[in-house]
């Protein structure tokens, strides 16, 4: 991962590491079966996100975290849209699994 920023939440840290490593199995293992993801407003499952993103989209830099490490901000690369600033805003369920992710384009 390209960062000196510590991601305090261990589940979010593992999710970002899985994304950076292109590890679909590790990514999926962190999400609840009923988790919902919104990628720039488009609703999808964790599996659908993996299919389009894992191994092809990644952070080039992580700039900061907020919300006790549940929100990660940085520069993001995609083959389709190029490079831009994003936030990954995670939510945890009662058992500590990821139940929601909102990927948003940011300007900061």
Image (cartoon, grey):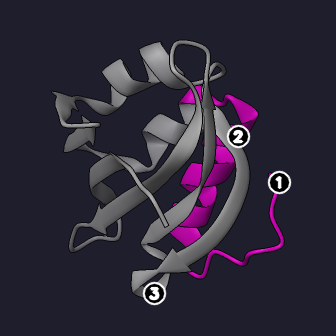
Q: Is residue 86 left or right of residue 44?
A: right
Percent position of residue 77, x then y: 64, 32
Q: Looking at the picture, does residue 57 appear above or below residue 85?
A: above
Q: What element does badge 3 sit on?
A: helix
Cα distance between the residues tagged 1 and 3: 20 Å
Q: Is residue 3 magenta?
A: yes
Q: Is residue 38 left or right of residue 27?
A: left
Q: Is residue 101 magenta?
A: no
**Earlier-in-chain disc, 2 versus 3:** 2
Residue named by callout 2 = 20
Residue named by callout 1 = 2
Q: Looking at the picture, does residue 51 appear above or below residue 36?
A: above
Give the foreground label among 1 and 3.
1
Percent position of residue 58, x then y: 65, 36
**Earlier-in-chain disc, 2 versus 1:** 1
Percent position of residue 93, x then y: 22, 67
Q: Is residue 63 left or right of residue 36?
A: right
**Which residues, given as a range, are shown in magenta?**
1-24
10 Å crowding of disc 3: few (<14), some (14-19), many (20+):
few
Q: Quadrant of residue 46?
A: top left
Q: Which mark is residue 68?
A: 3
CB contact under 8 Å: marks 2 and 1: yes
Q: Is residue 67 left or right of residue 79?
A: left
10 Å crowding of disc 2: few (<14), some (14-19), many (20+):
some
């Amino acid at each position: 991962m390209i960062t000196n920023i510590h991601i305090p939440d261990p589940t979010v840290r593992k999710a970002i590491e899985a994304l950076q490593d292109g590890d679909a199995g590790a990514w999926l293992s962190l999400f609840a079966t009923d988790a919902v993801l919104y990628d720039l407003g488009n609703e999808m499952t964790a599996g659908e996100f993996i299919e389009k993103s894992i191994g092809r989209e990644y952070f080039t830099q992580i700039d900061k975290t907020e919300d006790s490490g549940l929100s990660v901000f940085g520069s993001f690369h995609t083959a389709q849209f190029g490079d831009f600033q994003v936030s990954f805003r995670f939510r945890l369920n009662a058992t500590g699994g990821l139940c929601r992710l909102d990927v948003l384009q940011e300007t900061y």
